[in-house]
Image (spheres, grey):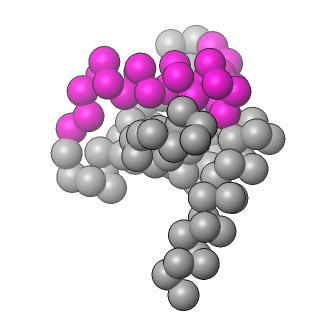
Amino acid sequence: MAKWLQSGLRRDICVVVAGLDEPTDRAVKRGIETKYGETVRPKTFHGAMRELVEIGYLDEEADGLQDRYALTELGRDRLAEQFEWMRERVE
């Protein structure tokens, strides 16, 4: 099992990044917090983001005060596999 599958937060970060036009770290964190109606500890959030960059699921680009993120091809593939797996079980 890939490391990212061990964390719902990491999966949700990938979903939020995929859905944003310009995903900054702040926008992604806000998207997660809006979805669940809870505050995510910054240390927890940034640790999950760092892990996704390290395992090659996200690309990170420093852009002034905020970092910008994008799903890599590997990240998109894993996200698509996850949704296919879920779709097969829900239908």
Q: Position of residue 56 (x, y in %)?
A: 70, 27
Give coordinates of residue 15: x percent, y percent: 54, 51
Relative horizontal placement of residue 56, taking residue 24 as reference (left or right): right
Q: Check the picture and name the quadrant holding the N terminus.
A: top right
Q: Is residue 77 visible?
A: yes
The C terminus lies in quadrant: bottom right
Q: Residue at x 53, y 78 (%)?
A: 89
Q: Residue furthest bottom?
A: 91
Residue drawn at (31%, 18%) of the image: 43
Front-most of residues 17 and 80: 80
Residue 87 location in percent, x, y? 58, 76
Residue 30's place in the image compared with 63, above or below, is: below
Chain part drawn in magenta = 39-63
Q: Is residue 68 visible?
A: no
Residues 77 and 40: in front is 77
Q: Where, by quadrant of the figure, is residue 3 drawn? A: top right
Residue displayed at 65% across by 68% down? 84
Q: Position of residue 28 (x, y in %)?
A: 46, 38
Taking the spot 40% from the left edge, 46% from the top edge, the residue there is 8
Q: Is residue 59 magenta?
A: yes
Answer whether residue 43 is magenta in the image: yes
The answer to whether 7 appears left or right of 35 in the picture is: right
Q: Is residue 74 left or right of residue 70?
A: right
Along the viewing direction, whichever of 32 and 83 lies nearer the viewer: 83
